[in-house]
Amino acid sequence: MARLKSILLVLPFALGAVPAAWAQATSCPPPTRAMLRAELYFGRNVAGRLGVGARQWDHFLAREITPRFPDGLTVLDARGQWRNPARQKLVREPSKLVVIVAADDAETRRRLAEVAAAYKKRFRQKSIGLVLSAVCAAF
């Protein structure tokens, strides 16, 4: 998952107006309101082996994600897989899936981009997976 093509990260930000336009045009039934659901897929392998252990992940979560999304999020353990295009080999790795439901605005997208950039830099990753969906939600 950590090696998903960078387009998964770039495309949603390039099309940032699409979710916002949906939010303005959609009527959500009470008590819900239009929001943005972000799924971030973080691969934990570095150089072919587990490089992001539990302690490193917890530190990253506490320092980079939680301060940017203090209203809440969900973290799930996952097992990702992707095809290495250079070797045409299937690669499997332990992953973390973070789900965030937040306001559908430029600030949320900026914070998501900051989280992705911090993870790539800290753990030498080429990319992370990012999926954005317009949703109706209530908390």
Image: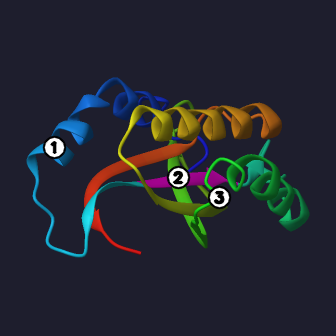
Element carrying mark 2: strand
Magenta stretch in the rendered image: 38-43
Decide: is 10 above or below 78.
above
Mark 3, other Cα within 10 Å: few <14 / some 14–19 / many ≥20: few
Q: CA distance from mark 3 to mark 2?
A: 16 Å
In the rendered image, residue 42 lying in the magenta stretch gets the answer yes
Return the residue at label 3: 70
Q: Are marks 3 and 1 in contact (CB under 8 Å)?
A: no
Crowdedness near tag 2: few (<14), some (14–19) or many (≥20) residues, C-alpha within 10 Å: many
Choose the circle earlier in sequence order: 3 or 2.
2
* Percent of width and height locating residue 48: 76, 48
Q: Residue at x 36, y 29 (%)?
A: 11
Taking the magenta stretch, the answer to whether it contains residue 135 is no
User: Which of the two discs, 3 and 1, labels the residue nearer the N terminus?
Assistant: 1
Q: Which of label 3 and label 2 is nearer to you?
A: 3
- Disc nearest the viewer among 1 and 2: 1
Snapshot quadrant of residue 121 = top right
Asked whether, in this view, residue 92 is left or right of residue 104, the answer is: right
The residue that label 2 is drawn on is 40
Residue 95: x and y in percent read 64, 61
Disc 3/disc 1 C-alpha distance (Å): 25 Å
Which numbered circle lies on residue 24?
1
- Name which residue type carries label 3: Pro
* Of callouts 1 and 2, the N-terminal one: 1
**Residue at x 63%, y 33% (from the top left corner):** 114
Identified at 53% across, 52% down, the residue is: 40
Q: Main secondary structure of the magenta part?
A: strand
Could you tell me residue 97's position as x and y percent? 56, 63
Q: Is residue 139 left or right of residue 76?
A: left
